Image (tube, rainbow, N blue to C red):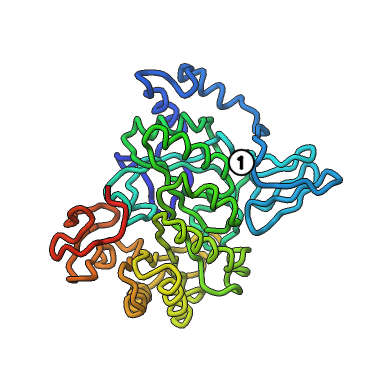
Amino acid sequence: MPHDPQHDHDRDGAPISRRGFLRTACMVGGGACLAGLGIDKLLTAAQAASPDAGKVAMYWKPLGDGRVKCLLCPRGCITSQGKRGECGARENRGGAYYSLVHGWVSAANVDHVEKKPFFHYLPGSLAFSIATAGCNMHCRDCQNWELSQSRPERVERMPATPADVAILASQQKCGTIAYTYNEPNVFYEYVYECAVAGHKRGVRSVIVSNGYINHDPISRLLPYLDAVKVDLKGFDDGFYRRYTGGTLRPVLDTLLTVRKSGKWLEVVYLVVPTVNDNPRSIDAMCAWVRDNLGRDVPLHFSRFHPDYQLRNLPPTPYSTLEDCWQRARKAGLHYVYLGNVPGSEGEHTYCPGCGKVVIQRTGFTVTANHLKNGRCGYCNKAIPGVWR
């Protein structure tokens, strides 16, 4: 299994292996497998399936001479016959653009929704988390690069239709499907169909995204999502270009689109020492969140640990994270959190009315919940979120 920056595991603490996922699938429907096959046949089918299988993508246009332009994300990749977009998960085949990851799962885990992290969305509930391969950014600090920076045919994967994913989520007592680990934008069609299938079974959907997507695709997807978490990598365009290969403005536009839609939104900022931890930049980002997304949008400052192309940097000092927390609170944000620092007071939800802890956490485990019908159990102030 690939490394997961949020340390996602199943309920026994171990990642779900490929064989384990398929074995779990065989429990669905009182013994029926994903495709109605026995486990041995299913494994054989998965191993024999062509790595070149694909599905016609939803957002692209022909340019003539066999070339196509992708309309999914701001990169707008233009590809000729047999070439792939920057994400590595889409390919021009005979003048049509194909997704190479639709119906293929490269990672699957059952974990608490706090690990995404969502702190104001169904606290303590379980999420059936899936991923494919590829990404439309190339973050130098990526902590799941084995998936995000790989091509689909180079990672272990297993077949699962959108209906299969919805059934598995329900069978595993997960109220939510989470699209995570690599960038959900690059398996957009699969996300869309899984979310539709999930809603038919009463299973919700959330995405954990870099927000680098065009307006039309995210607007079309939002009606089938129940919450969105966006990683805001930094707060200046130069940083985005140098460290992610993307640009800042489209991410801000996505945040505005999600907020305007009314879907629940949380924002994560991975604090990388000497790279994006400038106090002035932190202040500017906090002010932008306050003025454009609102004081009640949760903002998570997560601790960086050395990985991928930034192994030369140290983990984020706790003093830096604490300073970020204080700056965000001073800017007027009501719900500010610290991530990847278990035991910190920055893990708890505080009522902005009376100041008391209304949700207490240790790591990603909820240890106490003093909300009553979405309100503080002490002063009755409404606490925004998705609580039921």
Is residue 229 visible in the rendered structure shown here? Answer: yes
Rate crowding at label 1 as few (under 14), some (14 to 19) or many (20 or more) other CA atoms within 10 Å: many
Tell me: 136 left or right of 343.
right
Residue at 18 percent across and 61 percent down: it is: 376
Relative depth, front residue between 53 and 118: 118
Tell me the residue that label 1 is attached to.
152
Is residue 146 visible in the rendered structure shown here? Answer: no
Tell me how many marks there are.
1
Tell me: 78 left or right of 261.
right
In the picture, residue 95 is in which quadrant? top right
Q: On screen, 385 above or below 318?
A: above
Q: Which secondary structure lies at badge 1?
A: helix
Q: On screen, 278 above or below 347?
A: below
Residue at 35 percent across and 61 percent down: it is: 340
Looking at the picture, how far across and down is residue 115, in whole percent? 36, 52
Residue furthest right in the image: 65
Relative depth, front residue between 193 and 160: 193
Tell me: 24 left or right of 191.
left
